[in-house]
Amino acid sequence: MSAPLIVSIPHSLGRDEAMRRLKTGLSRTAANVPVMSVEEERWDGNRMSFRVRALGQVAAGHVDVEDSHVRLEVTLPWLLQRFAEVAQAAIQKSGQLLLTKR
């Protein structure tokens, strides 16, 4: 099994506001990426477990929401590992946009 892709995104929203934004953010982000769909999204406290499908491959992971940062960890299947750097940059950018104070 491959090493997980880990992205940490700092924020200054506090845990509750960050969770509120993330609860709508995954589905909204997936809607903007035609090759990706959300198959499962489940919250347990401040952790969201998820499973997404992209390019016919399934990736699973979780997001931990803390007071000052969000940590995403996802295990990519071998085909999607080739896109890990691009995925990491896209996740970082989308996450920062979602978690920026407005």
Image (spheres, rainbow, N blue to C red):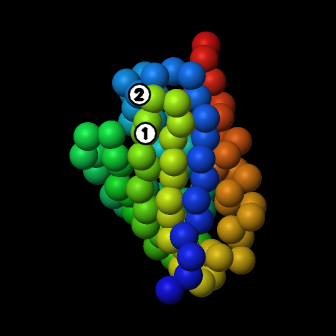
Residue at horizontal 61 percent and vertical 13 percent from the top:
102
**Tag 1: amino acid:** Val
In the displayed structure image, the side of residue 1 where residue 87 appears, left or right:
right
Asked if residue 17 is positioned above or below residue 64 in the image, the reply reads above
**In the foreground, 98 or 1:** 1
Percent coordinates x, y for residue 55 in the rendering:
59, 72
The extreme top residue here reads 102
Q: How crowded is mark 2: few (under 14 residues within 10 Å), some or many (20 or more)?
A: some
Percent coordinates x, y for residue 83 in the rendering:
71, 70
**Tag 2: amino acid:** Arg
**In the foreground, 26 or 10:** 10
Q: Name the residue under label 2.
A: 15
User: Is residue 7 visible in the rendered structure shown here?
Assistant: yes
Picture quarter containing residue 79?
bottom right
Q: Residues within 10 Å of mark 1 (few under 14, many from 20)?
A: many
- Contact? badges 1 and 2 (CB < 8 Å): yes
Q: Mark 1 points at which residue?
A: 65
Asked if residue 12 is positioned above or below residue 87 in the image, the reply reads above
The answer to which of marks 1 and 2 sits earlier in the sequence is 2
Q: Is mark 2 on a helix, strand or loop?
A: helix
Asked if residue 81 is positioned above or below residue 54 in the image, the reply reads below
Q: What element carries label 1?
A: strand
Percent coordinates x, y for residue 58 in the rendering:
46, 73
Residue at horizontal 51 percent and vertical 41 percent from the top:
70
| Number of the label disc, if any, that sits on residue 47 | none
Residue at horizontal 37 percent and vertical 24 percent from the top:
16
The span from disc 1 to disc 2 (Cα, nearest Å) is 6 Å
Residue at horizontal 70 percent and vertical 50 percent from the top:
90
Percent coordinates x, y for residue 72 in the rendering:
51, 52
**In the foreground, 45 or 24:** 45
